[in-house]
Amino acid sequence: MSFEPNNVLITGGAGFIGANFVRHWLDTTQQGKVVVFDALTYAGNIENLAGLDKNLRYVFVRGDICDEAVVRQLLEQHRIDTIIHFAAESHVDRSILGPDDFIRTNVVGTHSLLKAAKSLWIDQKTVAAHRFHHVSTDEVYGSLGPEDEPFHEATPYAPNSPYSATKAGADHLVRAYHETYGLDTTVTNCSNNYGPYQFPEKLIPLIIINILHGKPLPVYGDGMQVRDWLHVADHCEAIALVLRHGMSGEVYNVGGNSETTNIDLVHGLCAVVDDLVTTRDELSVAFPGAPAAEGKQAKSLVRHVRDRPGHDRRYAINFAKAKRELGYCPQRDLAAGLRSTVEWYLENAQWWQALLGREYTEWVNKNY
C-alpha cells in the first residue's frame, strides 16, 4: 500500500538534515504545501533555507514543537496530512553537559506533536489519510564490539548517552501512538550523516574549518571509534521512500555502508583539504593559516584528547529491510562524498563564518 503526501509539516526544517530534506522535497515533488517549523535555536539556521521563499509552495514558521496549540493551528490552517519530524537536540557532548533541553525537545516535543496529530487525524478525522514520520538515530541501539553484527530493526535498545536515551524515549512514544491509537507512523534510525549545511560543531565541518584556520584537530581517545557514514542526500532519498512506501507502524534502518574509524576519517579530510589548498592558489590566499598554504600537512594538527564519558565504540547499520522492502541503497561513496563536502564548505565560507560570530544570532532574533 502506497501513500502520497500532500501538505507536509517539516519540524526542524532549518537544521542540517531537515533543510536538506526541505530542498529535496521541493525539488522532487510538484504539489502540496511545504510548511517548515523551526525554533531557530543554535543549530537551526534560516540561511540553510535561503532562496526558498521564492517558491509559492514553501512556508516558514518560527516556533516551538512543545507548543501544542501552535502545532494544532498549523495542522488545521494548512490541512497538513504528513509530519516529518526532524526537530531534536542532537549533540552528544551538549547532552552530557545539560540533559534537560534534550528531554524537553526530544521527548516532550515529540509527544506534543503526537498529541496534536492524534487529535486532528484520529479523533476529528480532518484528512482522509495521514502519516507521522519520526527521524531517529542508530545511537538508540548502544554500542557494538568489533566483531558484532550491525544493528537491525529488532536490536534491543541500549542508549548510553542522555541524547540517545531521549531519542529512544521518542521512538517508543511514536510506537505507542501507533499501537494504542492507530496513528499511521513510520520511524527511521540512521547512521552518522554528513554533507552541506551541517552545523560547525559536528566532527566533519569542525575538522574542515579547523584545518583552514590552522587550529588543533581534537580526536577523542585513540580515535579508533567506528562510525557508519551516510551522505545526507542518501538519507533524504531514503525518507522519501519510507513516506511513500513504508508500512504503517514499521521501523527502517538507514545506513551508508561506509564504516570507518574516526582517526581515518580525520586523516582523509586532512588529505582532501591539503590537496585542494595546494592546487588552488585562491585558497592559499583566502586561508593562509591552513598548513598546506605553508607547505605543511594538516594531519600535524591532530591532537588526541580525553575520551568523552560513555563514548560508544562502534555503530554499524544493517539496512537490508529498507533495501528489500523499499529499494533503498546509498548512492554516494564515502571518499567522493567527503571531497564534495569539503568543496561545499570552501565554496560557502560565508555561510559558516557567519555562524562563528554573533551577527547571525542577532539578525535572526531581529527578523524572526
Image (cartoon, rainbow, N blue to C red):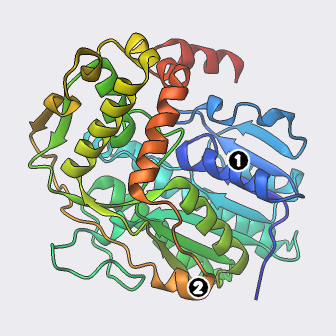
Q: Which residue does the numbered mark 2 point to in the structure image?
A: 179
Q: What residue type is labelled 1?
A: Arg
Front one among 199 and 170: 199
Residue 103's place in the image compared with 367, above or below, is below
User: Which residue in the structure is indicated by mark 1?
Assistant: 23
Q: Give the secondary structure at mark 2.
A: helix
Tell me how far mark 2 sits from mark 1, CA to CA: 32 Å
Residue that appears at 28% across and 45% down = 268
Spot occupied by residue 113 in the image (x, y as percentages of width and height)? 64, 58
Q: Which of marks 2 and 1 is in front?
A: 1
Looking at the rendered image, the quarter that the N terminus falls into is bottom right
Residue 83 location (% of width, % of height): 70, 61
**Among numbered discs 2 and 1, the one appearing first in the sequence:** 1
Q: Is label 1 in a helix, a strand or a loop?
A: helix
Image quadrant where one finds the C terminus: top right
Residue lying at the far front in this picture: please name it.
279
Residue sitting at x 62%, y 42%: 64
Q: Please identify the quarter of the rendering in which residue 301 is found.
A: top left
Say which of 157 and 323 sits in front.
Answer: 323
For this rendering, which residue is in front, 137 or 209? 209
Task: State left or right for residue 12 relative to residue 166.
Answer: right
Please give left or right for residue 341 compared with residue 311 in the image.
right
In this rendering, position of residue 293 left or right of residue 237? left
Bin the neighbour count of mark 1 within 10 Å (Cα to Cα): few under 14, some 14-19, many 20 and up. Answer: some
Q: Residue flagged by tag 2: what amino acid is it?
A: Glu
